[in-house]
Amino acid sequence: MQIKPNRLTLQKDNTAGNPITDKGATLGRVLFYDKNLSSNNTISCASCHIQANAFGDDTDASDGVNGTTTRHAMRLVNSRFSNERKFFWDERAATLELQSSEPIKNHIEMGFSGTNGDGSITTLISKLQGIGYYKELFKYVYGSEEITESKLQLALAQFIRSIQSFDSKYDLGRSAVQNDNQAFPNFTAQENQGKTLFLTPPVFNATGVRTSGGFGCAACHAAPEFDIDPNTRNNGIIGVINDTGIDITNTRAPSLRDLVNANGIPNGPMMHTGGLVTLQNVIGHYGTITIATRNTNLDPRLAPNGFGQQLNFQPGEVNALIAFIKTLTGTNVYSDPKWSSPFKS
């Protein structure tokens, strides 16, 4: 059963002036899956944002037309309800609309950068104007066959915002209680313990060691969206994929919904480097934060009293938190044909 977003979630809808329509999202779906949007006709948005992986990638770095990406591809589930309205790991795109055409204009990803011998976005538009089905679709959606970057952005953003997951065990439990702090009747004792650990702030001593309370995950990933807090800074991961430099500008993250699939297996490696491959790895990272001397952007919530936090895990706590995170996974998003490719393979 698909549970509709609750009232609090709907208040955080970042659609703004581009409401989802059947026409616009249909065009966006075609664009999302069309390899014609890359310079050599080999890569589409869906090449890196795969429905079977909650619209993320199962590899550290994604293949583009000119090499591999410099950051792991972020899952797109529930982008419509993100607390943080900016996009990309470094939040360089102010809106989803602006984000949607940046991979197209990236030399590595889809190859219409206008640099390094690439054609520009104008080259792509001319290419699409010569494709018969786009003449029909753009006239159907916009009343004109004219294609512009703005129209591409609007349609792609509508399709991406349409990708929603609200049929998880968490959603069923939340619908049966007044607030998240109550025990969910459909949860096991372990899952309810994990929920409490997730929601409850930790109590630290003078040197940053947790002495009581929970893990405080909700300070950055608040229910019911489980998206990233807009004020979040770097999370202590400062590496660069296949390089020796550092990257401390990574301050965004996808929703924790559908972090794992229905079998409890992660929908790909985690963090911007793709360097953590299990939930135990991720929880372990936050369990003992090491403050790197060059990380001038570490989120202060991870450094209580100036020390890297030590969550001082007690027996059973990590397994309980993992059990709760698994309740955030839905089923429909992985198979619903309205989010699948419109092209025959």
Image (spheres, rainbow, N blue to C red):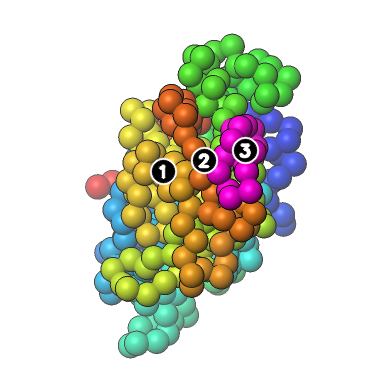
Give the SS element for disc 1.
helix
Dots 3, 2 in contact, CB < 8 A: yes
Label 2 SS: loop
Residue depicted at x 35% and y 83%? 118
* Label 3 CA crowd tier, 10 Å (few <14, some 14–19, many 20+): some
The 10 Å Cα crowd at callout 1, few under 14, some 14 to 19, many 20 or more, is some
Residue 198 at x, y percent in the picture: 57, 33
Where residue 77 sits: x, y (%)? 50, 44
Give the amino acid at mark 3.
Pro
Q: Quadrant of residue 230?
A: bottom right
* Residue 296 image position (x, y, % from top left): 56, 70
Bounds of the magenta span? 200-214
The single residue placed furthest to the top in the displayed view is: 185
Q: Earlier in the sequence, mark 3 or mark 2?
A: 3
Instruction: Give the Cα distance between marks 3 and 2.
Output: 8 Å
Residue on which the image places disc 1:
284
